[in-house]
Amino acid sequence: MENRAQLEVSQRKGNLHIRIKGVYAENTPYQLIDCLQQNYRGTGNIFIHTDRITEVVDARGLEDNSLDILARTSLNKNLIYLIGSKAMALHFPCNKIIIPPSQKARCTGCRKCTCTNKDYIFTTVQ
C-alpha cells in the first residue's frame, strides 16, 4: 500500500501556501518539490503548513536527497518556511520553522491580559 499525502495549494498575498494532509512518507518530499516547481511563480515566500499531517514516517534519511533535489531546481531554500508543530520532524530544507503557540482558553479579556499575546516560536535552520 502506497502512502500518499494530499497537498492543498493556495496563493495569498503573493505567497504560496501548501497544506500537507495525511501521512508524510518517503515519497512526500518528492511530491512537495514537484508541487513547488509547478505552482511557485517566482515571487513571494513559500509556506508549508504541517498541522494536518497525521503521521510522520521516519524521513531523516531523505534530508540529503531533498536538499540534492532542491539544489537542482530554481527554488531558493531561503524562501521556504515550515509552519506547525510537526515541522521539525520533516527534515525538509527550509529557512525557518514557525511553531504557533498552543491555543489557550480565553479569560475575561482584561486590558493587561497575557492570553492574547501570540508567542510564536521562530527557529532559523542552519
Image (tube, grey):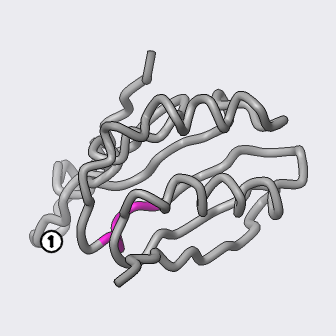
Above or below for 102 versus 120: below
- Magenta range is 49-53
Query: Residue at 60% across / 77% down in the picture?
Result: 8
Query: Residue at 53% across / 34% down in the picture?
Result: 94
Q: Nearer the viewer, residue 126 or 57?
A: 57
Quadrant (top left, top right, bottom left, bottom right) of the N terminus: bottom left
Residue 68 colored in magenta in the image: no
Q: Nearer the viewer, residue 70 or 17?
A: 70
> Where in the figure is residue 78, as x and y percent of width and height?
65, 27
Amino acid marked by disc 1: Arg
Q: Which residue is mark 1?
A: 106
Quarter of the rendering containing residue 124: top left
The kind of secondary structure element at disc 1 is loop
Query: Residue at 84% across / 35% down in the picture?
Result: 74
Overall secondary structure of the magenta stretch?
loop
Q: Answer left or right for 61 relative to 43.
A: left
> Where in the figure is residue 42, as x and y percent of width and height?
89, 45
Residue 51 colored in magenta in the image: yes
> Where in the figure is residue 6, as x and y percent of width and height?
51, 79
Q: Answer left or right for 45 relative to 74.
A: left
Quarter of the rendering containing residue 7: bottom right
Above or below for 93 versus 13: above
